[in-house]
Image: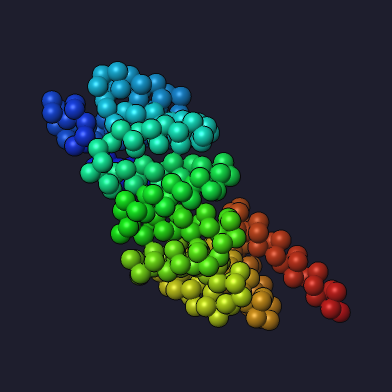
Amino acid sequence: MWRWLFLTWFILNPVAVHSSESEQSIKYDACLTLAETNPIKGYKKGLEWHAANGGVAARHCMAVSILFGGDNLNGASRLEALERDIPKEKTVLRSQILAQAGQALLMEGLVDRSSQLLTKAINLNPENPELYLDRATVKIDQSKFIQALNDLNQAIALDPNFGDAYLYRAYVKRDIKDIAGAVTDIKHVLKLLPGLPVAVLERGSLKELIGDKNGARKDWETIIKQAPSSEEAKAARKKIIGLDEKNLIIR
């Protein structure tokens, strides 16, 4: 989730004057890979690179190492500090850094602060649909469904093939009782991403809501058959048990 930052950062790095862009890209990629797979070694590598004038890239690698090590608050704090040190005109890079910090804070349950950072990120780069999706997930967590819907509408307007945005919009529409709209969005998700387990799971839930219990069961059984060890299959089993219990009560 972090690799797309390189294309912007290297022009800020003083080391780039003395080495090729490709060399810097390889070093940055290696540091981020280590940060994800072995955060302790990734942090050490980033620290060594920073001491050798690695600049923004090294600091970002260190922050990512901290995030993957499970310390979201420290990682978010470092990302915010990093954003403040990036030149003001580098709005896209600053936006990306703030979005990462916002995601880390959301994982810690700090939804208000997360929303603030994501709003700042959007203001810096309003053409990025992923930022609207990120903020929508925060609004959903806050039960601010209309605000979430507005963000998801904007994400889809910017990218009409944004499957994740349609999926979350279906969730929101279900919560605000727009079942027909939710069904339409799930159909769109499955058109873009055929067989996506999480979308099939939600389609089953929507079918149950409109009274198509057989259709719901079929969707959930399909997930269990195709991805038996997945989290979606676990949820599908619980839903089938719930469906059976309701049927017993009715009888």
Side of 245 relative to 131 (left or right): right
**Which is more toward the observer, 80 or 185?**
80
Residue 118 percent location from the top left of the image: 43, 50
84 up-or-down from 216: above or below: above
- At 44% from the left and 58% from the top, the residue drawn is 133
* Quadrant of the snapshot with the C terminus: bottom right
Side of 152 relative to 146 (left or right): left
211 up-or-down from 233: above or below: below
**Which is more toward the observer, 242 or 221?**
242
Quadrant for residue 236, please give it: bottom right
Can the viewer see residue 244?
Answer: yes
Residue 197 percent location from the top left of the image: 54, 62
Quadrant for residue 214, please give it: bottom right
Side of 146 relative to 51 (left or right): right
- At 27% from the left and 27% from the top, the residue drawn is 55
Count of labels shown? 0
Residue 48 percent location from the top left of the image: 33, 19
- At 40% from the left and 46% from the top, the residue drawn is 99
Residue 160 percent location from the top left of the image: 35, 70
* Quadrant of the snapshot with the N terminus: top left
Side of 177 relative to 84 (left or right): right
- At 71% from the left and 67% from the top, the residue drawn is 240
